[in-house]
Image (tube, helix red, strand yellow):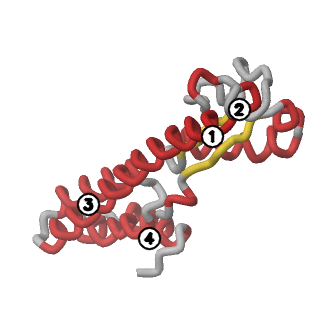
Amino acid sequence: MCIRDSLILLLISPNFLASNYCYSKEMKRALERHEAGTCHVIPILVHPAYWEDEPFSHLQMLPTGAKAITQWPDRDEAFEDVARGMSRAIKELLVSLKTSEKLFEEGEKLFDLKRYEEALVAYDQAIRLDPNLAFAYNKGDVLDALKRPKEAKHAYEKARELGYNG
């Protein structure tokens, strides 16, 4: 998983809210991915707009206090505030990525030790943290060892769908 695939910024303005394509297509897909846990969406209020009833209103808005960047007396301070908020989100993403990879490594070690049930738990936890961690769908090998061929086939298909050819 690459950090650039994991962070989506919504630049909120009246024009963004009025754009059928941005609002109905792009934002909808971004929020679906956010809810699925495959990315993190950060709305950034660029220009004043009524956003409180929008589908993203439950997310942490930047800058602090949801004050539009153009309304800050010093725009440099507004951009610095946004950068700080984005930095926090990126650090959280990197921690979760590292954790999912560690869980995958644990699954690999347990598989090598033929502790298949424990390996499966580790793979599933890695996938829960990062559903796009393609190589974690290697759990198909564990499922094969546990004589669960249908589930193994599904795991292998998911790995291929995500671009893993291991």
Of the image marks 4 and 2, the number of the one nearer the N terminus: 2
Residue where numbered disc 4 is placed = 156
Quadrant showing the C terminus: bottom left
Determine which residue is flagged by label 1.
79
**Mark 1 and mark 2 in contact (Cβ < 8 Å)?**
yes
Q: Secondary structure at mark 2?
A: helix
| Residues at marks 4 and 2 touching, judged by CB atoms closer than 8 Å | no
Please rate how many residues cluster around mark 2, counting C-alpha atoms within 10 Å: few if below 14, some from 14 to 19, many from 20: many
CA distance separating discs 3 and 2: 39 Å
Amino acid type, residue under disc 4 in the picture: Tyr
Label 3 sits on residue: 102
Between marks 4 and 3, how big is the CA–CA gap?
A: 21 Å
Q: Nearer the viewer, mark 3 or mark 2?
A: 2
The residue pinned by badge 2 equals 69
Image quarter of residue 104: bottom left
Q: Mark 4 vs mark 1: give the one in front.
A: 1
- Dot in front, 1 or 3: 1
Nearest to N terminus: mark 2 or mark 1: 2
Mark 1: which amino acid?
A: Phe
* Location of residue 46 in the rendering, given as x and y in whole percent from the top left corner: 74, 35
In the drawing, does residue 3 fall left or right of residue 120?
Answer: right
- The answer to whether residue 155 is above or below residue 31 is below
How far apart, in angstroms, are the residues tagged by discs 1 and 3? 34 Å
| Residue drawn at (10%, 71%) of the image | 113
Asked whether 36 or 85 is in front, the reply is 85
Give the amino acid at mark 2: Ile
